[in-house]
Image (cartoon, rainbow, N blue to C red):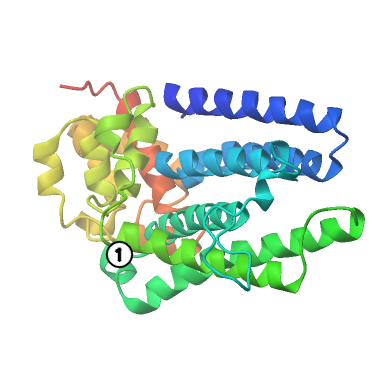
Amino acid sequence: MFSRSHYILAAVLFCITALFGFRFLQTANHEFLIYVGIVLAVSVFIAATFRRVRYPFVCLIGLAVWAVLHLAGGGIRIGNDILYGLILFPLSADYPVLRYDQVVHAWGFGVCTLIMYHLLANLLPQNDLRRFSMGLLVITSGMGFGAFNENVEFVLTVLLPQTGVGGYVNTSLDLCANFAGAVIAYLLVYFNFIRMESPENSFSEISLPEQAVGFYSQKPKQYNCAQAVAKTFKRDDLAESLKSCGGGNAPDGLCGALYAAILLAGEEQTESVKEQFLKVIGHLHCKAIRKEGKTSCADCVRRAAEIAEQSGFCLR
Protein backbone atom coordinates (compact mmCIF):
# COMPACT_ATOMS: atom_id res chain seq x y z
CA MET A 1 0.00 0.00 0.00
CA PHE A 2 2.84 2.38 0.81
CA SER A 3 5.87 3.00 -1.40
CA ARG A 4 9.44 3.62 -0.30
CA SER A 5 8.89 7.34 -0.80
CA HIS A 6 6.06 7.26 1.73
CA TYR A 7 8.24 5.56 4.33
CA ILE A 8 11.11 8.00 3.75
CA LEU A 9 8.79 10.98 4.12
CA ALA A 10 7.29 9.53 7.31
CA ALA A 11 10.73 8.81 8.77
CA VAL A 12 12.03 12.32 8.04
CA LEU A 13 8.92 13.93 9.54
CA PHE A 14 9.11 11.72 12.63
CA CYS A 15 12.79 12.58 13.24
CA ILE A 16 12.19 16.32 12.87
CA THR A 17 9.09 16.16 15.08
CA ALA A 18 11.02 14.21 17.73
CA LEU A 19 13.83 16.79 17.72
CA PHE A 20 11.39 19.66 18.19
CA GLY A 21 9.52 17.67 20.81
CA PHE A 22 12.73 17.22 22.79
CA ARG A 23 13.43 20.95 22.52
CA PHE A 24 9.92 21.84 23.70
CA LEU A 25 10.36 19.50 26.67
CA GLN A 26 13.63 21.20 27.58
CA THR A 27 12.08 24.67 27.42
CA ALA A 28 8.77 23.58 29.02
CA ASN A 29 6.89 24.87 25.96
CA HIS A 30 3.60 23.13 26.71
CA GLU A 31 1.71 24.80 23.88
CA PHE A 32 3.94 23.34 21.18
CA LEU A 33 4.21 20.02 22.97
CA ILE A 34 0.48 19.78 22.33
CA TYR A 35 1.13 20.57 18.67
CA VAL A 36 3.72 17.78 18.55
CA GLY A 37 0.97 15.45 19.72
CA ILE A 38 -1.37 16.83 17.07
CA VAL A 39 1.23 16.23 14.33
CA LEU A 40 1.66 12.63 15.46
CA ALA A 41 -2.12 12.10 15.74
CA VAL A 42 -2.73 13.49 12.25
CA SER A 43 0.06 11.27 10.88
CA VAL A 44 -1.59 8.20 12.39
CA PHE A 45 -4.97 9.26 10.99
CA ILE A 46 -3.53 9.68 7.49
CA ALA A 47 -1.85 6.26 7.66
CA ALA A 48 -5.10 4.66 8.85
CA THR A 49 -7.20 6.23 6.10
CA PHE A 50 -4.65 6.05 3.28
CA ARG A 51 -6.01 2.82 1.80
CA ARG A 52 -9.40 4.43 1.21
CA VAL A 53 -8.44 8.05 0.50
CA ARG A 54 -5.19 7.52 -1.44
CA TYR A 55 -3.79 10.94 -0.55
CA PRO A 56 -1.72 12.27 -3.49
CA PHE A 57 1.98 12.37 -2.64
CA VAL A 58 2.14 16.11 -3.35
CA CYS A 59 -0.43 16.62 -0.57
CA LEU A 60 1.54 14.44 1.84
CA ILE A 61 4.68 16.46 1.15
CA GLY A 62 2.67 19.64 1.67
CA LEU A 63 1.36 18.41 5.02
CA ALA A 64 4.83 17.37 6.14
CA VAL A 65 6.29 20.76 5.20
CA TRP A 66 3.41 22.45 7.02
CA ALA A 67 4.14 20.47 10.19
CA VAL A 68 7.84 21.39 10.05
CA LEU A 69 7.09 25.06 9.39
CA HIS A 70 4.68 25.11 12.32
CA LEU A 71 7.06 23.43 14.76
CA ALA A 72 9.90 25.66 13.58
CA GLY A 73 7.70 28.69 14.20
CA GLY A 74 7.51 27.86 17.88
CA GLY A 75 10.93 26.23 18.32
CA ILE A 76 13.31 28.68 16.63
CA ARG A 77 14.02 32.06 18.16
CA ILE A 78 14.92 35.18 16.21
CA GLY A 79 16.29 37.72 18.66
CA ASN A 80 13.88 38.01 21.57
CA ASP A 81 10.92 36.51 19.72
CA ILE A 82 10.04 33.16 18.19
CA LEU A 83 10.01 32.72 14.42
CA TYR A 84 6.22 32.98 14.38
CA GLY A 85 6.47 36.66 15.32
CA LEU A 86 8.87 37.56 12.51
CA ILE A 87 7.67 40.10 9.93
CA LEU A 88 8.98 38.78 6.62
CA PHE A 89 7.89 41.75 4.51
CA PRO A 90 6.36 44.88 6.12
CA LEU A 91 3.34 45.42 3.87
CA SER A 92 1.28 47.56 6.24
CA ALA A 93 1.95 50.34 8.74
CA ASP A 94 -1.20 49.48 10.70
CA TYR A 95 -1.20 45.69 10.78
CA PRO A 96 1.52 43.05 11.28
CA VAL A 97 1.61 41.91 7.66
CA LEU A 98 3.33 39.90 6.16
CA ARG A 99 4.26 37.71 9.12
CA TYR A 100 5.78 34.22 9.13
CA ASP A 101 2.65 33.00 10.90
CA GLN A 102 0.44 34.13 8.00
CA VAL A 103 2.63 32.40 5.41
CA VAL A 104 2.35 29.15 7.38
CA HIS A 105 -1.43 29.56 7.53
CA ALA A 106 -1.66 30.16 3.78
CA TRP A 107 0.54 27.15 3.06
CA GLY A 108 -1.24 24.79 5.43
CA PHE A 109 -4.79 25.52 4.46
CA GLY A 110 -3.81 25.65 0.82
CA VAL A 111 -2.75 22.02 1.26
CA CYS A 112 -6.07 21.28 2.98
CA THR A 113 -7.81 22.74 -0.08
CA LEU A 114 -5.84 20.38 -2.35
CA ILE A 115 -6.98 17.45 -0.21
CA MET A 116 -10.60 18.57 -0.43
CA TYR A 117 -10.21 18.83 -4.22
CA HIS A 118 -8.88 15.28 -4.24
CA LEU A 119 -11.77 13.99 -2.12
CA LEU A 120 -14.41 15.66 -4.28
CA ALA A 121 -12.67 14.55 -7.47
CA ASN A 122 -13.24 10.93 -6.41
CA LEU A 123 -16.99 11.61 -6.37
CA LEU A 124 -17.53 14.02 -9.25
CA PRO A 125 -16.68 14.12 -12.95
CA GLN A 126 -13.66 16.30 -13.73
CA ASN A 127 -15.79 18.79 -15.66
CA ASP A 128 -17.97 19.40 -12.61
CA LEU A 129 -14.92 20.39 -10.56
CA ARG A 130 -14.17 23.12 -13.08
CA ARG A 131 -17.51 24.82 -12.52
CA PHE A 132 -17.52 28.00 -10.43
CA SER A 133 -19.86 26.51 -7.82
CA MET A 134 -17.60 23.50 -7.29
CA GLY A 135 -14.53 25.71 -7.12
CA LEU A 136 -16.25 27.77 -4.46
CA LEU A 137 -17.09 24.59 -2.54
CA VAL A 138 -13.48 23.38 -2.68
CA ILE A 139 -12.13 26.74 -1.50
CA THR A 140 -14.62 27.12 1.34
CA SER A 141 -13.99 23.51 2.40
CA GLY A 142 -10.29 24.28 2.74
CA MET A 143 -11.13 27.43 4.67
CA GLY A 144 -13.33 25.36 6.98
CA PHE A 145 -10.23 23.58 8.23
CA GLY A 146 -8.74 27.00 8.92
CA ALA A 147 -11.80 28.01 10.97
CA PHE A 148 -11.50 24.79 12.95
CA ASN A 149 -7.84 25.62 13.59
CA GLU A 150 -8.87 28.95 15.12
CA ASN A 151 -11.16 27.05 17.48
CA VAL A 152 -8.21 24.88 18.50
CA GLU A 153 -6.12 27.98 19.15
CA PHE A 154 -8.93 29.43 21.28
CA VAL A 155 -9.05 26.25 23.39
CA LEU A 156 -5.29 26.53 23.87
CA THR A 157 -5.63 30.09 25.14
CA VAL A 158 -8.16 28.82 27.68
CA LEU A 159 -5.99 25.92 28.82
CA LEU A 160 -2.67 27.75 28.56
CA PRO A 161 -3.23 31.52 29.03
CA GLN A 162 0.48 32.22 28.47
CA THR A 163 0.33 31.14 24.81
CA GLY A 164 1.41 33.64 22.16
CA VAL A 165 -1.87 33.36 20.24
CA GLY A 166 -3.18 36.85 19.52
CA GLY A 167 -6.64 38.37 19.72
CA TYR A 168 -9.26 39.49 17.22
CA VAL A 169 -6.85 41.13 14.76
CA ASN A 170 -4.56 38.11 14.76
CA THR A 171 -7.48 35.75 14.17
CA SER A 172 -8.83 37.90 11.34
CA LEU A 173 -5.43 38.08 9.64
CA ASP A 174 -5.07 34.31 9.99
CA LEU A 175 -8.44 33.81 8.30
CA CYS A 176 -7.41 36.13 5.48
CA ALA A 177 -4.21 34.13 5.04
CA ASN A 178 -6.26 30.90 5.01
CA PHE A 179 -8.48 32.35 2.27
CA ALA A 180 -5.49 33.42 0.19
CA GLY A 181 -3.87 30.00 0.52
CA ALA A 182 -7.09 28.20 -0.41
CA VAL A 183 -7.67 30.34 -3.51
CA ILE A 184 -4.06 30.01 -4.69
CA ALA A 185 -4.10 26.22 -4.17
CA TYR A 186 -7.32 25.80 -6.15
CA LEU A 187 -6.06 27.98 -9.00
CA LEU A 188 -2.80 26.00 -9.15
CA VAL A 189 -4.79 22.79 -9.61
CA TYR A 190 -7.35 24.38 -11.94
CA PHE A 191 -4.65 25.61 -14.32
CA ASN A 192 -2.65 22.36 -13.96
CA PHE A 193 0.38 23.92 -12.27
CA ILE A 194 -0.06 21.19 -9.66
CA ARG A 195 -0.91 17.70 -10.87
CA MET A 196 -1.73 14.78 -8.67
CA GLU A 197 0.77 11.92 -8.81
CA SER A 198 0.65 9.61 -11.79
CA PRO A 199 0.28 5.88 -11.09
CA GLU A 200 2.55 5.04 -14.02
CA ASN A 201 5.41 6.92 -12.34
CA SER A 202 4.90 6.14 -8.68
CA PHE A 203 3.35 2.68 -8.21
CA SER A 204 6.29 0.41 -8.90
CA GLU A 205 6.40 -0.69 -5.25
CA ILE A 206 2.63 -0.75 -4.63
CA SER A 207 0.49 -3.87 -4.94
CA LEU A 208 -1.51 -4.41 -8.11
CA PRO A 209 -4.91 -3.85 -6.44
CA GLU A 210 -3.69 -0.53 -5.03
CA GLN A 211 -2.29 0.41 -8.43
CA ALA A 212 -5.75 -0.21 -9.87
CA VAL A 213 -7.30 2.13 -7.31
CA GLY A 214 -4.62 4.65 -8.18
CA PHE A 215 -5.50 4.52 -11.86
CA TYR A 216 -9.16 4.92 -11.02
CA SER A 217 -8.50 7.86 -8.65
CA GLN A 218 -5.98 9.61 -10.89
CA LYS A 219 -6.44 13.36 -11.33
CA PRO A 220 -7.50 14.59 -13.78
CA LYS A 221 -9.88 11.68 -14.23
CA GLN A 222 -8.71 9.46 -17.08
CA TYR A 223 -10.02 5.94 -16.48
CA ASN A 224 -13.33 4.42 -15.48
CA CYS A 225 -13.45 1.41 -13.14
CA ALA A 226 -13.12 -1.17 -15.93
CA GLN A 227 -10.24 0.65 -17.60
CA ALA A 228 -8.40 1.02 -14.28
CA VAL A 229 -8.32 -2.76 -13.82
CA ALA A 230 -7.18 -3.33 -17.39
CA LYS A 231 -4.47 -0.65 -17.17
CA THR A 232 -3.09 -2.24 -14.00
CA PHE A 233 -2.30 -5.39 -15.96
CA LYS A 234 -0.81 -3.39 -18.84
CA ARG A 235 -3.68 -4.25 -21.19
CA ASP A 236 -3.93 -0.88 -22.89
CA ASP A 237 -5.79 -2.47 -25.80
CA LEU A 238 -8.45 -3.80 -23.45
CA ALA A 239 -8.62 -0.51 -21.56
CA GLU A 240 -9.34 1.29 -24.82
CA SER A 241 -12.25 -1.05 -25.59
CA LEU A 242 -13.69 -0.55 -22.09
CA LYS A 243 -14.17 3.21 -22.41
CA SER A 244 -17.94 2.86 -22.36
CA CYS A 245 -18.12 0.30 -19.55
CA GLY A 246 -18.09 2.64 -16.56
CA GLY A 247 -21.08 3.87 -14.59
CA GLY A 248 -23.11 0.67 -14.90
CA ASN A 249 -22.74 0.42 -18.69
CA ALA A 250 -20.87 -2.90 -18.80
CA PRO A 251 -22.74 -5.80 -20.45
CA ASP A 252 -25.74 -7.02 -18.40
CA GLY A 253 -25.26 -4.08 -16.05
CA LEU A 254 -22.31 -5.75 -14.36
CA CYS A 255 -19.88 -3.69 -12.32
CA GLY A 256 -17.32 -2.45 -14.86
CA ALA A 257 -14.39 -3.50 -12.69
CA LEU A 258 -15.82 -7.01 -12.38
CA TYR A 259 -16.35 -7.20 -16.15
CA ALA A 260 -12.71 -6.28 -16.72
CA ALA A 261 -11.58 -8.95 -14.26
CA ILE A 262 -13.68 -11.54 -16.13
CA LEU A 263 -12.05 -10.60 -19.43
CA LEU A 264 -8.60 -10.75 -17.89
CA ALA A 265 -9.15 -14.09 -16.15
CA GLY A 266 -10.64 -15.76 -19.24
CA GLU A 267 -14.09 -17.07 -20.13
CA GLU A 268 -13.48 -20.40 -18.39
CA GLN A 269 -13.15 -18.64 -15.04
CA THR A 270 -16.19 -16.39 -15.37
CA GLU A 271 -18.29 -18.09 -12.68
CA SER A 272 -15.35 -18.32 -10.29
CA VAL A 273 -14.58 -14.62 -10.71
CA LYS A 274 -18.22 -13.67 -10.12
CA GLU A 275 -18.40 -15.88 -7.03
CA GLN A 276 -15.28 -14.33 -5.50
CA PHE A 277 -16.50 -10.82 -6.26
CA LEU A 278 -19.97 -11.51 -4.87
CA LYS A 279 -18.54 -12.95 -1.65
CA VAL A 280 -16.85 -9.65 -0.74
CA ILE A 281 -18.90 -6.96 -2.50
CA GLY A 282 -22.34 -8.51 -2.07
CA HIS A 283 -23.63 -7.73 -5.57
CA LEU A 284 -22.53 -8.18 -9.16
CA HIS A 285 -24.39 -5.31 -10.79
CA CYS A 286 -23.37 -1.67 -10.60
CA LYS A 287 -26.83 -0.30 -9.81
CA ALA A 288 -27.33 -2.72 -6.93
CA ILE A 289 -23.91 -1.88 -5.45
CA ARG A 290 -24.59 1.84 -5.68
CA LYS A 291 -28.13 1.51 -4.31
CA GLU A 292 -26.91 -0.33 -1.23
CA GLY A 293 -24.27 2.36 -0.72
CA LYS A 294 -21.95 0.29 1.45
CA THR A 295 -19.16 -0.24 -1.07
CA SER A 296 -17.34 2.46 -3.02
CA CYS A 297 -16.33 2.15 -6.66
CA ALA A 298 -12.70 2.21 -5.54
CA ASP A 299 -13.34 -0.87 -3.37
CA CYS A 300 -14.88 -2.65 -6.35
CA VAL A 301 -11.83 -1.80 -8.44
CA ARG A 302 -9.53 -3.09 -5.70
CA ARG A 303 -11.43 -6.36 -5.32
CA ALA A 304 -11.63 -6.94 -9.09
CA ALA A 305 -7.87 -6.44 -9.43
CA GLU A 306 -7.26 -8.85 -6.54
CA ILE A 307 -9.34 -11.50 -8.28
CA ALA A 308 -7.62 -10.93 -11.62
CA GLU A 309 -4.25 -11.28 -9.92
CA GLN A 310 -5.29 -14.44 -8.08
CA SER A 311 -6.68 -15.93 -11.28
CA GLY A 312 -3.13 -16.26 -12.57
CA PHE A 313 -3.27 -13.47 -15.13
CA CYS A 314 0.33 -12.39 -15.77
CA LEU A 315 1.59 -8.96 -16.71
CA ARG A 316 2.75 -8.89 -20.31
Task: Judge from the rendering whether residue 133 lies leftward or rightward of residue 180; answer left or right.
Answer: left
Q: Give the tally of numbered discs.
A: 1
Residue 75 figure quarter = top right
Q: Residue 264's spot in the image, x, y percent?
A: 21, 33
Q: Residue 151, relative to residue 62: is it above or below? A: below
Task: Judge from the rendering whether residue 259 lies leftward or rightward of residue 237; answer left or right.
Answer: right
* Residue lying at 29% horizontally and 54% vertically, measured from the top left: 254
In front here: 220 or 267?
A: 220
Q: Is residue 198 visible?
A: yes
Mark 1 surroundings within 10 Å by alpha-carbon count, few (fewer than 14), some (14 through 19), many (20 or more): few
Q: Is residue 288 visible?
A: no
Callout 1 secondary element: loop
* Residue lying at 74% horizontally and 73% vertically, measured from the top left: 168
Residue 102 figure quarter = bottom right
* Residue lying at 58% horizontally and 56% vertically, measured from the top left: 105
Extreme-bottom residue of the structure: 133
Instruction: Give the residue pinned by disc 1.
Output: 125
Q: Residue 34, relative to residue 11: is it above or below? A: below
In front here: 142 or 263?
A: 142
